[in-house]
Image (spheres, rainbow, N blue to C red):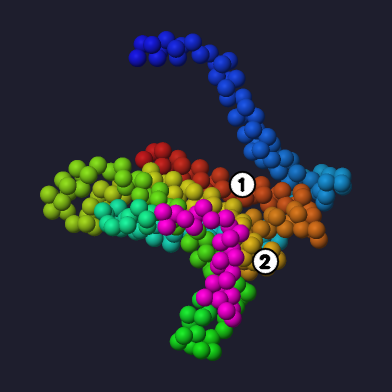
């Protein structure tokens, strides 16, 4: 122990700075700089890299708040957010509780549940587009067993297309949260379960009084990741929509992408203002959640 302390005292702040400099440089270039440029560009009219940026103060934000597509995309993000908190996380917790018992094939099931998370989103989009294909898709084929004349455009119906995309997103991420919860459950000492059972506690009481309080930090991490992911989700919404604009399933990330990079729009400043609002919204939601988690 004394040897360790003597070596630790030899390191100065300058030495630590040298070690941290490469990581901080990469972080500054790829995280801090884009955030700063997005804030800066949000106050300018800027149509393309070849055009001149013109200062417009808060005009981009005024136009944004008057755009009905922006509010529609924001509602869709909140649909994904509440769906992930009220559907994905409870289902993942239930699966984790079931897999926490010593059952046959638990290791295989854990791997199987996590597999969708490591599949590329492009492959996931192709898979679910096949499942939702109106004529020859798996889902339509199963329903036609009972209703031979059934026909429904799952991904083209304005009122429900985002819901079916949300099912695909849930399939991709539920396994990830299940593994997180299983890691939290594995940290609970077995003695707590045994003592509770000796006192006559039911399984529901054990879950409520022991399991949930013990995995509260894990629940906080999963909730934070779900909130951030729901606000910035892009890939499956864009890919399963065929890359075509559709306000019935537009979310903020696809909305920002179309504003900034669509060849018919190409409004970098306007897109940056939407990105800034998304960033601020994420901070408003996540910071109180983290503060509450730290208090606990």
- For marks 1 and 2, the one nearer the N-term is 2
Image point (59%, 52%), residue name: 232
Image point (41%, 38%), residue name: 294
- Residue 122 sits inside the magenta stretch: yes
- Please name the residue that numbered disc 2 is placed on: 242
Q: Quadrant of residue 110?
A: bottom left
Residue 82 percent across, percent down from the top left? 48, 59
- Whether residue 271 sits left or right of residue 281 in the image: it is right
- Residue 89 sits inside the magenta stretch: no
Viewport quadrant of the C terminus: top left
From the viewer's side, name the closer residue of 226 and 169. Answer: 169
* Residue at disc 2, secondary structure: loop
Q: CA distance from mark 1 to mark 2?
A: 26 Å
Residue 159 percent across, percent down from the top left? 58, 74
Vertical position of residue 144 compared to residue 168: above or below: below
- Please name the residue that numbered disc 1 is placed on: 279
Vertical position of residue 116 compared to residue 49: above or below: below
Q: Quadrant of residue 28?
A: top right
Can the viewer see residue 73? no
Sort mark 1 into few (<14), some (14-19) or many (20+) by Cα contacts within 10 Å.
Answer: some
Residue 8 percent across, percent down from the top left? 45, 14
Give the magenta part as a residue range.
111-138
- Whether residue 230 sits left or right of residue 106 in the image: it is right
């Amino acid at each position: 122990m004394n040897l360790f302390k003597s070596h630790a005292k030899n390191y100065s702040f300058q030495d630590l700075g040298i070690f941290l400099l490469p990581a901080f440089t990469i972080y500054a270039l790829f995280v801090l700089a884009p955030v700063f440029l997005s804030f800066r560009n949000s106050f300018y009219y800027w149509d393309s890299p070849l055009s001149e940026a013109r200062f417009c103060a808060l005009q981009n934000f005024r136009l944004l708040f008057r755009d009905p597509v922006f509010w529609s995309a924001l509602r869709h993000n909140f649909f994904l957010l509440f769906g992930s908190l009220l559907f994905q996380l409870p289902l993942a917790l239930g699966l984790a509780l079931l897999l926490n018992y010593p059952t046959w094939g638990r290791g295989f099931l854990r791997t199987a549940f996590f597999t969708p998370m490591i599949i590329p989103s492009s492959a996931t989009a192709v898979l679910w587009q096949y499942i939702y294909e109106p004529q020859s898709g798996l889902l339509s084929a199963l329903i036609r067993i009972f209703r031979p004349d059934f026909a429904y455009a799952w991904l083209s119906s304005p009122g429900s297309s985002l819901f079916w995309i949300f099912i695909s997103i849930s399939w991709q991420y539920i396994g990830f949260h299940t593994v997180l919860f299983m890691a939290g459950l594995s940290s609970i000492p077995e003695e707590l379960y045994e003592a509770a059972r000796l006192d006559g506690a039911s399984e529901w009481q054990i879950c409520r009084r022991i399991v949930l309080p013990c995995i509260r930090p894990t629940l906080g991490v999963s909730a934070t990741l779900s909130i951030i992911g729901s606000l910035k989700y892009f890939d499956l919404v864009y890919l399963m929509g065929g890359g075509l604009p559709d306000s019935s399933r537009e979310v903020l990330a696809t909305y920002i992408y179309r504003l900034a990079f669509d060849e018919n729009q190409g409004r970098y400043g306007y897109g940056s203002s939407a990105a800034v609002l998304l960033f601020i919204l994420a901070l408003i939601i996540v910071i109180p959640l983290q503060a509450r988690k730290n208090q606990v």
